[in-house]
């Protein structure tokens, strides 16, 4: 009987120990899950604050543009694939500052209108899409803007497996005072826009300014740095824009 009692007692104690161990494991697992949830919530909170800040800043830049530009008609949506208001405001300010005789832009759209309305004497905009080139022409016509030449430049095979604008479309270009690089779309290959350096470096006027969008991406950041290195009398400034932007201007 004593042996049976001892055996039962051992079983009870073992059960209590197992229950305690299981409870401890469950507690630790729940604690880890809770900590994981808290970390995820913190990440979401930080991202949400960042997005709210960007949205507010873009709204502020857009409102300034609407006041500064004497627009005759509505404009297409900005942000996303299109230029963000912060970039458009930078284009406006740059044109006002340097008063360019010739602006060349890679990637047409609202930015084409802004460059022209800001006072540039001549704007030539390249687009690899016939559809978007025509939409930009219609936009320019609606706003009764002169001095804008929107050119369709097919995206053709370039070196090292890249595709870039048909170079025959830019043969006549020279003494460019402001070069805006926001095309071709650069999501598939980080070096998609890199040919702009080779094709335009010698077409710039001595005091030209180069604006590059999307420099938060590695390929565009490298292009900005290499473009600045190729212009020894210029300096590179990175702007904290929604997509990141770079300005390369005379020292």
Image: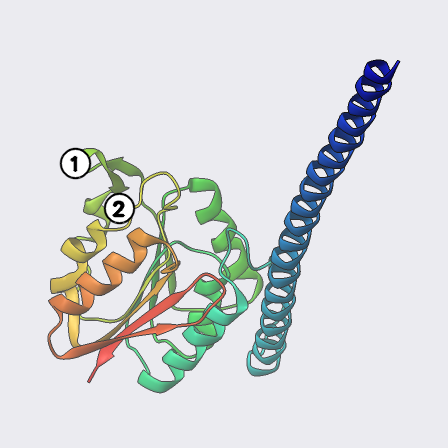
In space, the residues marked 1 and 2 are separated at their CA atoms by 10 Å
Q: Position of residue 172 (x, y in %)?
A: 18, 57
Quarter of the C terminus within the rendering: bottom left
The furthest residue to the front: 2
Residue located 73% across and 32% down the image:
22
Against 221, residue 56 (above or below) is below
What is the crowding at mark 2: few (fewer than 14 residues within 10 Å), some, or many (at least 20)? some
Label 1 sits on a secondary structure element that is helix
Is 236 displayed left or right of 122 in the figure?
Answer: left
Residue located 54% across and 58% down the image:
139
Q: Nearer the viewer, residue 199 or 1?
A: 1
Residue placed under numbered mark 2 in the picture: 191
Please tell me in which quadrant of the rendered image residue 164 appears: top left
Q: Position of residue 43 (x, y in %)?
A: 60, 56
What is the crowding at mark 1: few (fewer than 14 residues within 10 Å), some, or many (at least 20)? few
Residue placed under numbered mark 1 in the picture: 160
Q: Position of residue 21 (x, y in %)?
A: 71, 35
Q: Nearer the viewer, residue 82 or 111?
A: 82
* First in residue order: circle 1 vs circle 2: 1
Against 243, residue 102 (above or below) is below
| Marks 1,2: beta carbons within 8 A | yes
Is 201 displayed left or right of 102 in the figure?
Answer: left
Please tell me in which quadrant of the rendered image residue 155 appears: top left
Quarter of the N terminus within the rendering: top right
Q: Position of residue 106 (x, y in %)?
A: 34, 56
Residue 48, numbered label: none
Residue located 54% across and 68% down the image:
85
Please tell me in which quadrant of the rendered image residue 130 appears: top left
Q: Nearer the viewer, residue 166 or 53?
A: 53
Residue located 58% across and 61% down the image:
142
Label 2 sits on a secondary structure element that is loop
């Amino acid at each position: 009987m004593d042996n049976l009692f001892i055996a039962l007692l051992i079983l009870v104690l073992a059960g209590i120990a197992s229950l305690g161990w299981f409870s401890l494991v469950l507690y630790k697992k729940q604690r880890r899950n809770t900590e994981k949830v808290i970390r995820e919530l913190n990440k979401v909170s930080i991202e949400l604050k960042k997005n709210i800040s960007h949205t507010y800043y873009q709204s502020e830049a857009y409102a300034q543009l609407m006041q500064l530009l004497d627009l005759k008609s509505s404009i297409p949506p900005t942000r996303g694939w299109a230029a963000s208001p912060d970039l458009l405001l930078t284009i406006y300010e740059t044109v006002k500052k340097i008063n360019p005789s010739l602006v060349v832009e890679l990637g047409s759209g609202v930015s084409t209108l802004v460059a022209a309305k800001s006072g540039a004497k001549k704007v030539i905009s390249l687009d690899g899409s016939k559809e978007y080139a025509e939409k930009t022409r219609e936009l320019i016509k609606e706003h009764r803007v002169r001095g804008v030449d929107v050119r369709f430049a097919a995206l053709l095979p370039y070196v090292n497996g890249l595709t870039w604008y048909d170079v025959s479309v830019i043969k006549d270009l020279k003494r460019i005072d402001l070069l805006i690089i926001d095309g071709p779309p650069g999501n598939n290959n980080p070096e998609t826009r890199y040919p702009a350096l080779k094709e335009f470096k010698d077409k710039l006027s001595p005091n030209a300014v180069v604006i590059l969008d999307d420099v938060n991406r590695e390929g565009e950041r490298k292009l900005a740095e290499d473009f600045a290195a190729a212009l020894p009398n210029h300096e590179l400034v990175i702007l904290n824009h929604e997509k990141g932007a770079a300005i390369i201007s005379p020292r």
